């Protein structure tokens, strides 16, 4: 069985004032779920005492060098991360990251011993053109390096039109995509849904056969919002 995973992506949110939220998230009754928090890199060492697995939100493909403002996978690992998000659509859009870039970054995450949380997702335009499954298959083929296993990779399906918009994909839309992805990645790799997951819609999503958890943005910032999602996953 794939592992059940609740991952929070704080994006560019959170200073030391938010440490108490992370600590409270770590107190959730998570049962057999893995709870991962991907805070800004500045908080990784600060959160070493939280009862949470920690992740980076991005890593450069190289281990070190002249790349002002960037961060490498060994740096994230050194700061306490055991996971790293790669290929998030905000990185793809804001920084022009291509599938080839994401593939190199995912390989770099593995090389540093990190488990990659590789994100893929279609735009609204692509969905309306009926291209969703082809786009996702192409992203996965282009950005997942050879050697992916259930031990080094988690896949997150995040429709771009559902991220931060309050528009969650319907259960039928998620089921269609996750069933297709499951056929592509095999039976053991965890497959998360992301995009406007909230306490109110989590249980319906987690009830789907091929949904093993969620990558949560906005609703992971506050323990009061994230803990019920974690508990819904534990109960699923
Ligand atoms: P959201 O973000 O939950 O705020 O829609 C999800 C994500 O981008 O990982």
Image: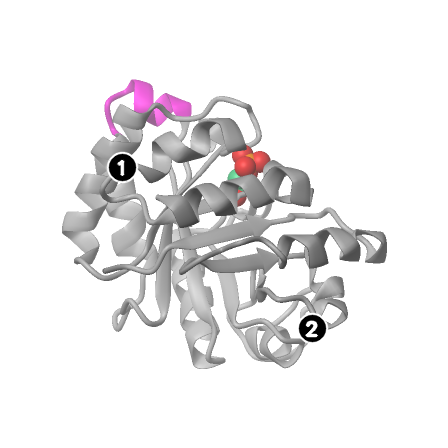
Residue at which label 1 appears: 208
Q: Residue at x 43, y 64 (%)?
A: 116
In the rendered structure, find residue 48 and report the number of the disc placed on it: 2
Q: Residue at x 30, y 32 (%)?
A: 174
Q: Residue at x 19, y 40 (%)?
A: 179
Query: Residue 15 vs residue 84: left or right?
Result: right
The x, y position of residue 208, in whole percent, is: 27, 37
Magenta-drawn stretch contains 26: no
Q: Is residue 209 above or below residue 167?
A: below
- Region rendered in magenta: 124-131
Q: Quadrant of residue 60?
A: bottom right
Magenta-drawn stretch contains 127: yes
Q: Is tag 1's residue or tag 2's residue first in the polypeptide sequence?
A: 2
The x, y position of residue 173, in whole percent, is: 28, 27
Find the residue positioned furthest to the top. 128
State the SS at label 1. loop
Which of 224 and 37 lies nearest the eye of the viewer? 224
Helix, strand or loop for the magenta stretch, by majority: helix
- Kindly check if marks 1 and 2 are in contact, taking CB atoms under 8 A apart as contact: no
State the SS at label 2. loop
Query: Residue 102 vs residue 207: left or right?
Result: right
Ligand 1 quadrant assignment? top right
Q: Residues within 10 Å of mark 1 (few under 14, many from 20)?
A: some
Q: Quadrant of the N terminus?
A: bottom left
Q: Residue at x 45, y 28 (%)?
A: 201
Q: Can see residue 21?
A: yes
Q: Residues within 10 Å of mark 2 (few under 14, many from 20)?
A: some
Which of 180 and 4 lies nearest the eye of the viewer? 4
The x, y position of residue 128, in whole percent, is: 31, 18
Query: Residue 143 vs residue 112: left or right?
Result: left
Q: Quadrant of the C terminus?
A: top left
């Amino acid at each position: 069985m794939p592992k059940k995973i609740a991952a929070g992506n704080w994006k560019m949110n959170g200073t030391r004032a938010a440490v108490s939220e992370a600590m409270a998230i770590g107190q959730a009754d998570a049962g057999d779920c893995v709870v991962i928090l991907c805070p800004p890199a500045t908080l990784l060492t600060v959160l070493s005492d939280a009862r949470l697995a920690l992740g980076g939100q991005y890593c450069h493909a190289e281990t070190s060098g002249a790349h002002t403002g960037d961060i490498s996978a060994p740096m994230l690992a050194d700061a306490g991360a055991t996971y790293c998000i790669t290929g998030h659509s905000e990185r793809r859009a804001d920084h022009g990251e291509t599938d080839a870039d994401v593939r190199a970054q995912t390989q770099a995450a593995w090389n540093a011993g990190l488990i990659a949380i590789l994100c893929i997702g279609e735009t609204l335009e692509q969905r309306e053109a009926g291209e969703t499954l082809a786009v996702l298959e192409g992203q996965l083929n282009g950005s997942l390096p050879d050697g992916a296993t259930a031990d080094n990779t988690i896949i997150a399906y995040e429709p771009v039109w559902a991220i931060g918009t309050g528009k969650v994909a319907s259960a039928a839309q998620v089921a269609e995509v996750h069933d297709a992805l499951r056929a592509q990645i095999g039976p053991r790799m965890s497959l998360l849904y992301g995009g406007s997951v909230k306490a109110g819609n989590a249980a319906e999503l987690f009830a789907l056969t091929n949904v093993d958890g969620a990558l949560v943005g906005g609703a992971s910032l506050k323990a009061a919002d994230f803990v019920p999602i974690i508990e819904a996953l534990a109960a699923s």
